[in-house]
Image (tube, rainbow, N blue to C red):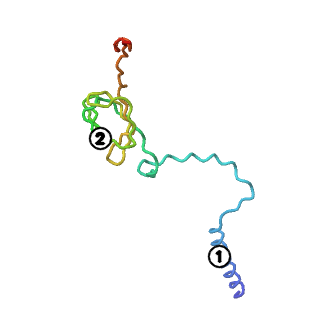
Amino acid sequence: MKRTLVVMVALLAMVAFASGVMAQAPAKTEKPAAVAPAPAPEKAKPAAEKPKTSKPKAMTFKGAVSGYEMGKMIKVKGSKDKEMTFDVTGETKMKGVVKEGAKVTVTYKKDGDKMIATNIAGPAEKKPPKKEKAAEKPPEKK
């Protein structure tokens, strides 16, 4: 009887250890797994998590020039009396006439709380009409 009891305790101990090991080991399957559906594309990261190395999106604003300092800043008054001020840098491209009262389109980017003009397009310069050259010159004397 004593011998049977020792064998039973030994068997129970083996089963206890073996089941502990089996619970921790990953299940192995001999069959190939069924074809899994394609993984869903990654969702876009929220704006707060985007790296700051990406280029800022260019935006535009149209209106009349209400203030202009060459090479420094431009104030543009748009529709609904909305007025915006943009920094003008050496890299800002100018096209057309930019003066107070002129209608312009400003392409800009945000840099922190500043708005930096990248392109300013105003109305084309008006060329004076060509006059006839013969009428301007007096006749030559010989």
Residue situated furthest front in the rendering: 142
Question: Does 36 sit above or below residue 99?
Answer: below
Per the image, the residue denoted by label 2 is 73
Task: Report the front residue among 53 and 30.
Answer: 53
Residue on which disc 1 sits? 17
Decide which of 24, 17 is in the foreground and name it: 24
Q: Secondary structure at mark 1?
A: helix
Residue 58: x percent and y percent? 41, 39
Q: How many marks?
A: 2
In the rendered view, tell whether residue 88 sits above or below residue 142.
below
Image location (x, y in percent) of residue 25: 65, 67
**Residue 82 vs residue 42: left or right?**
left
Of tags 2 and 1, the one toward the viewer is 2
Give the answer, above or below, for where 88 lies relative to 126. below
Residue at (39, 31) in percent of width and height:
95
Q: CA distance from mark 2 to mark 1?
A: 79 Å
Please tell me which residue is depicted at 38% across the width and 35% down the height of the picture. Answer: 94
Which label was assigned to residue 83? none
Q: Is residue 129 left or right of residue 28?
A: left
- Name the image quarter holding the C terminus: top left
Q: Is residue 136 left or right of residue 39?
A: left
Residue at far right of view: 30
Counting from the top left corner in percent of width and height, residue 112 is at 34, 48
Which structural element holds mark 2? strand
Q: Earlier in the sequence, mark 2 or mark 1?
A: 1
Q: Amino acid at mark 2?
A: Met
The residue under label 1 is which amino acid type? Phe
**For this rendering, which residue is in front, 50 or 21?**
50
Is residue 55 shown above or below 97? Answer: below
User: Which quarter of the figure is the N terminus placed in?
Assistant: bottom right
Residue 125, given in percent of the width and then of the height, sits at 36, 25
Q: Residues within 10 Å of mark 2 (few under 14, many from 20)?
A: some
